[in-house]
């Protein structure tokens, strides 16, 4: 069966391209999503992207991933990384393997960004590689078994 992957973007990532470009680069979210979908399709998989600035929508999206029988989640929880027990709990509840992605290196920034509510649940985490982190996560997701 074709692999089905969900890509989740947390708050403020809709502003990529113009948001603090020195930290997050100039690539827009639409460009990332288009490329990710194309890479997935060319590998015979499917990928849907969802961005929300609302915690409840992110949680509902993760719950729906279970109903949709997604095989893998790639998530940049953005600011929720450092605050959200409920988004973490949603990922634990659906029990779908996931990779956590951050465009910036959260370990080179403010001390409070070093803590993630997600990393110990994630299969893996990529940070500091800009949009390349999404490509790496997708390559991993496509090869991931089980
Ligand atoms: C981010 C890092 C977070 O600390 C921040 O709140 C974001 C983006 C990143 O992709 O580097 O919104 O997740």
Image (tube, rainbow, N blue to C red):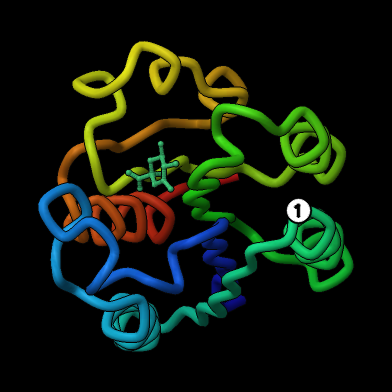
Residue drawn at the location 17% of the way across and 57% of the way down: 132
Residue 94 position in % (x across, y down): 83, 45
**134 or 55: nearer the eye?**
55
In the displayed structure, does residue 22 sit left or right of residue 19?
A: left
In the displayed structure, does residue 26 sit left or right of residue 111?
A: left
Image: 20 above or below 6: above
- For label 1, being within 8 Å of ligand 1 is answered no
In the displayed structure, does residue 125 sit left or right of residue 53?
A: left
Residue 67 position in % (x across, y down): 89, 68
Residue drawn at the location 22% of the way across and 54% of the way down: 24
Image: 81 above or below 61: above
Residue 37 position in % (x across, y down): 39, 84
Image: 47 above or below 16: below
Indicate the quadrant containing the C terminus: top left, top right, bottom left or bottom right: top right
Q: Secondary structure at mark 1?
A: helix
Q: Residue 106 falls in which quadrant of the image?
A: top left
Residue 3 position in % (x across, y down): 55, 71
Determine the residue located farthest toward the top in the rendered image.
111
Residue drawn at the location 25% of the way across and 23% of the way down: 109
**11 or 4: nearer the eye?**
11
Q: Which residue position holds label 1?
A: 55
């Amino acid at each position: 069966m074709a692999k089905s992957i969900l890509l989740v973007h947390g708050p403020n990532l809709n502003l990529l391209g113009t948001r603090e470009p020195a930290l997050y680069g100039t690539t827009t979210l639409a460009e990332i999503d288009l490329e990710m979908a194309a890479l997935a399709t060319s590998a015979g998989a499917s990928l849907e992207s969802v961005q929300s600035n609302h915690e409840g929508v992110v949680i509902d999206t993760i719950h729906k991933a279970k109903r949709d029988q997604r095989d893998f989640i790639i998530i940049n929880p953005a600011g929720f990384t450092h605050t959200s027990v409920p988004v973490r709990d949603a990922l634990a509840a659906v029990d779908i393997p996931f990779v956590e992605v951050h465009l910036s290196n959260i370990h080179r920034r403010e001390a409070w960004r070093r803590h993630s509510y997600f990393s110990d649940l994630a299969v893996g985490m990529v940070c500091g590689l800009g949009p390349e982190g999404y490509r790496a996560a997708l390559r991993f997701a496509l090869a991931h078994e089980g």
